[in-house]
Image (tube, rainbow, N blue to C red):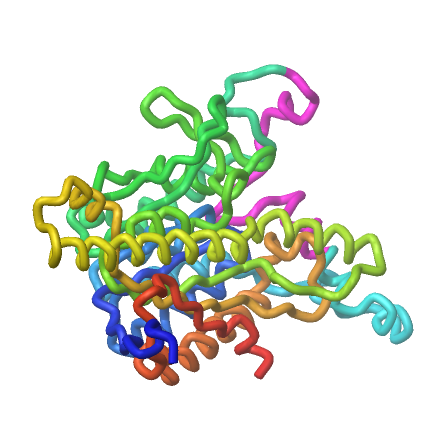
Amino acid sequence: MPAAHKTARIIEPQRSILVFQGGGALGAYQAGVYEAFEASGRQPDWVVGTSIGAINAALIAGNPPNRRLERIKAFWNRMARPETGLAAGWSLPDEAGQLLGNGLGSMLRSLHTMAFGLPGFFQPRTNAAFAWGLAGAPTDASFYDVAPLRETLLELVDFDYLADSPVRLSVGAVDVESAQIRYFDSQHCRIGIEHILASGALPPAFPPVEIDGRLYWDGGLYSNTPLDWILHQPRIHSLCLFAMLWQQNDIPPQTLSDVLRRSKEIQYLSRAESLIAIEQELHQLRHAVNLLSYELAKTDAQSPLRDLARLGCGSVFHLVYLQVPRLAGEDHNKDIEFTAGRVAERWAAGLADTHLALREKPWEREKVARSEGIVVHDYSSASAR
């Protein structure tokens, strides 16, 4: 039997981390993830998010434990739109309904949102200069104004509490001029409303946000998977719930709608699988350095190589993969489909998937070899079980 297996052991996580991708309306799934997490008696030590994931993360870290779920529900209740008129799918002839069904309803709901905005989130600009290709202030370079979202977040997130919150918050945004990703982290700076807005400033819909003289757009443009920020700091045994909002796998597309939807999924999935594979290799190297340093210290405590120990690490990340399910009739605009029914379905799926993972607790049953640093527990198809 290989030595690595002889020394395998159960690793108990010492902290909990929630990682939230960007994905607009799909973010209701993350709200369900948090509800199940809280219901299990847990509270996160660290939340990391991009775009809508940054908003959900701020609602968690920016409120005391007894108000977190209440504030998340308030936000999503405000975002959820009633299903009325033709956009709800009624008044269609039987044959047209069978042919177009949910797909037509999805298209009409998306067109309504694009035309009129979303109360509490964004509204069309009254000045159409940008839409006509005219130059203006960089902070006005967008189709929509997010002043409603600013007011919503100032009401639902306590930024004074966030400054001293026991929950660490990290949100990703990309520098417009340098094209570099930056994570604003509550351990290193005071997070304000501008940081959350910057993380969700997806062009050309929303304008860049100025922070310390620099302009920032949605972090999802660079990387919609903020795992790299936490996996580069591997010092504590961790349980990490990663709520993906874009599907990894699909059948070959057959229609224009299929092609547009699938290409968007690939774009915003942001190489999550390859990123984790790379980080697994890096963690194995860190573990190898850690073990070699330990053996070296036993034979030659004064070795000049002892400084290499700081490059090693023995921590283990239990990474739980969660993934929002596909809903009937979804198209490439599913991330702006905020109807109450869709919000409820995605929330319920996040709740059910996370309940299952937390009930099974594979990190308490599966032994980990000493060479392993990242252990993946795949619940990405839990909603289909």
Q: Is residue 221 above or below residue 104?
A: above
What segment is highlighted magenta in the picture? Answer: 108-134
Q: Nearer the viewer, residue 212 or 121?
A: 212
Q: Residue 254 lies in magenta, yes or no?
A: no
Q: Tell me residue 133's x, y (percent).
A: 68, 20
Q: Nearer the viewer, residue 100 or 169?
A: 169
Q: Residue furthest right?
A: 95
Q: Which quadrant of the view contains residue 18? A: bottom left
Residue 63 visible somewhere in the drawing: no
Q: Who's the residue at 67% across and 26% down the image? A: 131
Q: Residue 113 lies in magenta, yes or no?
A: yes
Q: Residue furthest front?
A: 299
Which image quarter is the N terminus in? Answer: bottom left
Q: Tell me residue 375's x, y (percent).
A: 40, 68
Relative placement, left or right, of 301 versus 161 is left
Which image quarter is the C terminus in? Answer: bottom right
Q: Who's the residue at 32% across and 44% down the image? A: 154
Q: Nearer the viewer, residue 274 or 335?
A: 274
Q: Is residue 218 above or below residue 300?
A: above
Q: Who's the residue at 38% across and 42% down the image? A: 196
Q: Who's the residue at 60% across and 52% down the image? A: 336
Q: Tell me residue 2's x, y (percent).
A: 38, 75
Q: Which quadrant of the view contains residue 163? A: top left
